[in-house]
Image: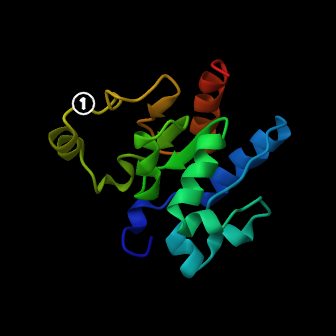
Amino acid sequence: SKYFPDRNVDISEWFKFYEYLVAQGHTVVVIPDQEDCFRSREYTKFPWVVFEPAAFDVDLRMALCCGAKLNFASSNGPSSLLCFSEAKFLLFDLLRGGIIKKSWWERHNGFPVGENYPWLGQNQRLVWEDSSFETLKKEYLKAAKNF
């Protein structure tokens, strides 16, 4: 993000994870960040399967997410919709960059950092770590036991 660069993820770590999942035999579709679609288009520097229309159409995004075996997302506005859906997901980077502090989170969300929203299902989880290849892979391996 141009406005909150401390919250930006290392897209090369996500691409490394993408390659790992593809090597495991999964079909992976990336929904790029909407701001990135309009600005620097960093996601185009990597040869992954991307579905740009879902970055602009909320219904299309949610249809794709709800049909996925598992969604991996970095915390942002559109990814918050996952928390109000039936989609299976792991949501990373909730406190990334220190913009959102633990005390703010707990005061505004009503539960401690490290827990889930009380309405989330078994295959819907907040991951209280920043995304990196190692963290993404570790959480994938935990979640894959439920497939």
Which amino acid, mark 1?
A: Pro
On the rendered structure, is 117 left or right of 104? right
Judge whether residue 10 can be spotted in this image: no
The location of residue 34, given as percent across then percent down, is 53, 70
On the rendered structure, is 96 left or right of 62? left
The location of residue 45, given as percent across then percent down, is 73, 70
Query: Farthest residue toward the left?
Result: 107
* Residue visible at 18% across and 46% down in the picture: 104
Query: Farthest residue toward the bottom?
Result: 39
Against 8, residue 18 (above or below) is: above
The residue tagged 1 is 112
* Residue visible at 46% across and 31% down in the picture: 125
Q: Quadrant of the C terminus?
A: top right
* Residue visible at 41% across and 41% down in the picture: 83
The location of residue 32, given as percent across then percent down, is 60, 64
Q: Quadrant of the N terminus?
A: bottom left
Q: How is the image coloured?
A: rainbow
Q: Quadrant of residue 128?
A: top left
Q: Quadrant of residue 138?
A: top right
